[in-house]
Amino acid sequence: MVARHWATALERLGLTVRTVAGAGVADRLLPALAIGASGLDSPGADTDDLAGALDGADLVVVANVCSLPLNPSAAGTLATLLAGRRAILQHHDLPWQRVRFAGVEGWPPDDPAWVHVTINELSRTELAARGIAATTVYSGFADPPRGRREPARERLGVAGGGRLLLQPTRAIARKNVPAGLALAEALGADYWLTGPIEEGYGPELERLLAAARCRVHRRLPVGLTMEDAYAASDAVAFPSAWEGFGAPVIEASLHRRALAVSDYPVAAELASFGLRWFPVDDPEPLRAFLADPDQALLDHNRAVALRHFSLGALMRQLAELLRAAGWGALLG
């Protein structure tokens, strides 16, 4: 229920963190919390496991479970169990920001004892318009290790002078794969889409890739990491139509890679910190950069990312949040 970087930042602030999730890696796994699970939606459903996971916690951080109705039974049960308790509800996306949930009302749940946190100012102001006060806490990232450029390019069969455009996203409609492909085609680059297919996008992705006029690479070959993928790439495409934040923007900046970013709403917030990138729908500026790379631009973006979106920056934001909520005694 708490994002990995939040857990790291809270631990460095002196808190003992126990993570609970429906799937993936956590100190405790409760399948009833997973997206689409229905273990808590029947009358008289046993909530002892979830209550036990929360037992003894001085503060509960709920990461996105109560934001989108992807598991309404888990969200409702959590809201009941946390009523009157210290909790932070972190919101990445909210129902009205997604077409399929636009008609959902009564979300997110609220309680006077809770603090709501958004990962962008847009969501904070939209929550305020609905009567829920929130604080913006931008995502924090660890400074990544340098990836292995040549071994990764060799695994993909990319020639030494060939261009490789990385799109480090999932394969779903709002990630705008057609725009990423079009940019790769215009640049004469290989296109690498690393994320999994979700939300029934498989048939459409298959059609798009079959019609592509460039070499296409899918997923991460065994033995390669995302650090290797960023190192292997010559530029990163992030053509999404909607993002609550946009982690690849910061990751690419930390890896000193040129960026092509779409005009999704929250992109303007990230740009306001000083990050600079190229348009997705006009390949010429990026083509010119790749022909004669400006290292100062890459250095600038990395410096901005380290200043505003590092784990240290996240720790400062969280410490301020806890003190403002009157929970400063939790800090070590």
Image (cartoon, helix red, strand yellow):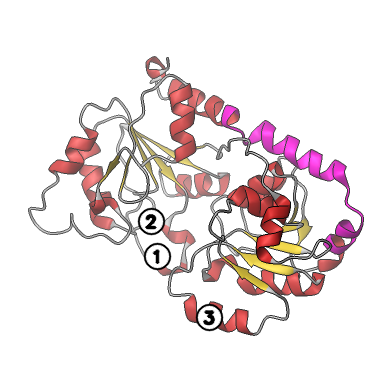
Q: Position of residue 260 (x, y in %)?
A: 74, 59
Task: Please give the residue where the numbered disc 2 appears in the rendered image.
Answer: 68
Callout 1: SS: helix
Q: Position of residue 118 (x, y in %)?
A: 49, 43
Badge 1 vs badge 2, beta-carbon distance below 8 Å = yes
Q: Is residue 240 above or below residue 113?
A: below
Residue nearest the viewer, comparing 135 with 258 = 258
Q: Which mark is residue 66?
A: none
- Residue at 46%, 63% in the rendered image: 98
Dominant secondary structure (helix, strand or loop) of the stretch shown in magenta: helix
Callout 2: SS: loop
Residue 151 shows in the view:
yes
Say whether residue 192 is left or right of residue 29: right
Task: Please give the residue where the numbered disc 1 appears in the rendered image.
Answer: 101
Residue 261 shows in the view:
no
Say whether residue 165 is left or right of residue 319: right
Residue nearest the viewer, comparing 123 with 214 = 214
The answer for how far apart the CA atoms under marks 1 and 3 are is 22 Å
- Residue at 54%, 80% in the rendered image: 206
Badge 2 vs badge 3, beta-carbon distance below 8 Å = no
Q: Nearer the viewer, mark 2 or mark 3?
A: 3
Q: Quadrant of residue 48?
A: top left
Task: Please give the residue where the numbered disc 3 appears in the rendered image.
Answer: 204
Q: Is residue 182 above or below residue 266?
A: below
- Residue at 45%, 68% in the rendered image: 198
Q: Which residues are magenta?
A: 286-312
Q: Earlier in the sequence, mark 1 or mark 3?
A: 1
Residue nearest the viewer, comparing 169 with 90 = 169
